[in-house]
Image: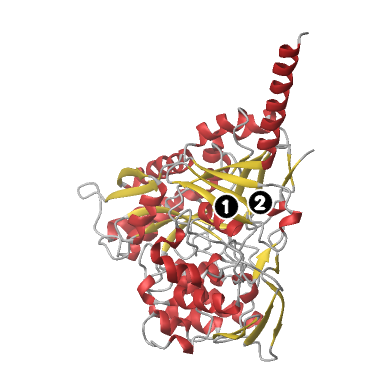
């Protein structure tokens, strides 16, 4: 073997090793929908949360099992009356540009979140903070009255409207992340662009190609950077589950966050141990626009709900065993016990259909005047499969259904603007408490896509959340849930299971009830 051959082979081997090393440095994640923003106050989907939770960190963050642990705060104390939380920030915490993270950055972020001019969809999740709701509704214009104060650079005090058992959990949500005031003041709306954005989480974004991917690398300014086993992540936009599974099998993806449900048996046989299908806190549902006749008629909404044969969807249509949902709050939710259920839950299906026909007849619909409805869903084979099945379930009622699909960000934008008659939605718990589900149906909440409104419901939810005794609170909130179910405020269909496929070379992926798997806890096998 001559010198040149030796040098060529050595170069080839080195190149191969570098390629393996580069792959091991970055985890490739199939992320589903397209990311609309890297600004944590401008996002709403779980696909966006996967990125936001890697690049930002709140006072409190999640461990590998999604339980709350100290984040930017090293510790906190709570007053005896449960109203005042005092957080001590870690020493030396920094933004990715080396500037210190201060208590003032949290004050700035909360004030920006609640500023009505910014119209943050999820601002209501932090209404438990003193004066937050009044500021967000424009009733208070002095932001200094918000119950978030910087005592000094390292001490943050948050005062609540009332004792809130889930408050620490709520602080893990992206609405509670700090923001870099020094960058936003300098760059304005452009602060979020690559090249401008600075973050305070384990990773920082270095590339964002809308419709394609977001790439992150280790943030060497983060306090725990030396413990990170993965150098960065690449989050791929891809709503075609069949294509995603093919790319996973080809080694292009290390983690799938969804897969074609009709492939589940094949996956279990041919990719043993790689499918992670476990229950978690979430409800798959249809919204019905209560502001648009005839869907403003409770009888129409109830008829559509009763005719959905939920028992066949999980085992037969999807094949992944999702349980039928007859409640709005999933069973097993903390601080709640058994949820309320629809009054017709245990009727035989044929009796449900007969009652649904009767309700539609009373509402003025029949063979000579069929109910016509457009059913919208975001592009996804699984959503399409369900929509086709439910349209066929409604057919015996004489309902004529037009199916309409769009990409995820368009779908949710149209839902928030009320441009739907019936639309597919899903809610995955931001924190483990019934309030996180019940607040979705409160009047005026942006994520109340069906625009259902009931003053008594709103009043009872507020009363429940002002009740400190957890048992009494649960009973009050259950009354609110019963009102929503009796009014068919929405159509719950099934309780979610998380559906991930994880490469055997990925370690540290822990199944949990909120399906959160931050990159900081993952590693590759040596």
Residue 513 locus on image (x, y percent)? 66, 57
Residue at horizontal 48%, vertical 67%? 183
Q: Can residue 110 be seen from the camera position used here?
A: yes
The image quarter in which residue 407 lies: top left
Residue 53 relative to residue 197: left or right: right
Residue 466: quarter of image? bottom right
Nearer the observer, 342 or 366: 342
Residue 98 horizontal/vertical position (percent): 61, 65
Q: Residues within 10 Å of mark 2 (few under 14, many from 20)?
A: many
Q: What residue appears at the point 40 percent right and 51 percent down from the top-left corner?
A: 409
Q: Position of residue 302 (x, y in %)?
A: 39, 60
What is the quadrant of the N terminus in the image? top right
Question: In this view of the protein, which residue sits in the foreground, 320 or 272?
Answer: 272
Q: At 55% across and 72% down in the image, what residue appears?
A: 435
The residue identified by callout 2 is 519
Q: Is residue 482 visible?
A: no
Q: Residue furthest left?
A: 368
From the viewer's perspective, is residue 431 above or below residue 24?
below
Give the CA separation, mark 2 to mark 1.
Answer: 23 Å
Q: Are marks 2 and 1 in contact (CB under 8 Å)?
A: no
Residue reaching furthest to the front: 3
Above or below, 226 relative to 247 = below
Of the numbered discs in the image, which one, if any, rests on residue 496? 1
């Amino acid at each position: 073997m001559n010198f040149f051959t030796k040098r060529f082979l050595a170069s080839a081997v080195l190149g191969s090793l570098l390629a393996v090393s580069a792959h091991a440095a970055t985890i490739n994640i199939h992320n589903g929908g397209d990311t609309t923003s890297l600004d944590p106050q401008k996002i709403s989907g779980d696909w966006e949360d996967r990125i936001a939770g890697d690049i930002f960190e709140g006072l409190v963050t999640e461990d590998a099992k999604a339980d709350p642990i100290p984040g930017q705060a090293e510790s906190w104390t709570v007053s005896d009356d449960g109203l005042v939380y005092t957080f001590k920030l870690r020493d030396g915490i920094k933004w990715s540009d080396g500037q210190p993270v201060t208590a003032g950055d949290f004050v700035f972020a909360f004030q920006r979140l609640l500023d009505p001019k910014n119209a943050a969809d999820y601002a209501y999740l932090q209404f438990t903070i003193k004066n937050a709701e009044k500021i967000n509704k424009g009733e208070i214009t002095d932001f200094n009255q918000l119950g978030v104060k910087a005592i000094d650079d390292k001490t943050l005090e948050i005062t609540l409207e009332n004792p809130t058992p889930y408050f620490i959990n709520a602080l893990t949500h992206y609405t509670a992340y700090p923001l870099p005031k020094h960058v936003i003041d300098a760059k304005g709306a452009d602060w979020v662009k690559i090249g401008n954005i600075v973050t305070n989480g384990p990773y920082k974004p270095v590339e964002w190609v809308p419709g394609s991917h977001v790439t992150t690398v280790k943030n060497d300014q983060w306090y725990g950077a030396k413990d990170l086993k993965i150098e960065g992540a690449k989050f791929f936009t891809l709503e075609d589950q069949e294509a995603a599974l093919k790319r996973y099998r080809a080694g292009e993806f290390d983690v799938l966050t969804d897969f074609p449900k009709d492939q589940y048996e094949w996956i279990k046989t041919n990719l043993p141990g790689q499918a992670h299908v476990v229950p978690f806190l979430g409800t798959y549902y249809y919204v019905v626009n209560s502001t648009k006749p005839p869907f403003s008629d409770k009888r129409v909404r109830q008829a559509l709900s009763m005719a959905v044969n939920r028992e066949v969807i999980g085992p037969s249509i999807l094949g992944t065993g999702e349980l039928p949902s007859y409640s709005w709050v999933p069973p097993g939710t903390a601080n709640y016990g058994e949820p309320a259920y629809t009054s017709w839950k245990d009727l035989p299906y044929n009796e449900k259909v007969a009652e649904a026909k009767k309700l539609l007849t009373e509402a003025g619909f029949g063979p000579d005047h069929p109910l016509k409805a457009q059913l919208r869903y975001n592009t996804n084979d699984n959503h399409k499969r369900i929509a086709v099945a439910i349209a066929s379930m409604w057919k015996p009622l004489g309902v004529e259904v037009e199916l309409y699909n769009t990409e995820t960000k368009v779908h949710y934008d149209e839902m928030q603007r009320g441009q739907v008659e019936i639309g597919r939605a899903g809610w995955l718990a931001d924190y483990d408490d019934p309030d996180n589900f019940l607040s979705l149906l409160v009047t005026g909440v942006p994520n109340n896509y069906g625009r259902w409104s009931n003053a008594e419901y709103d009043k009872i939810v507020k009363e429940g959340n002002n009740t400190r005794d957890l048992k009494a609170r649960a009973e009050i909130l259950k009354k609110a849930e019963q009102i929503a179910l009796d009014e068919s405020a929405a159509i719950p269909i099934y309780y979610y299971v998380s559906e991930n496929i994880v490469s055997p070379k990925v370690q540290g992926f822990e199944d949990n009830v909120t399906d959160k798997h931050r990159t900081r806890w993952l590693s590759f096998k040596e």
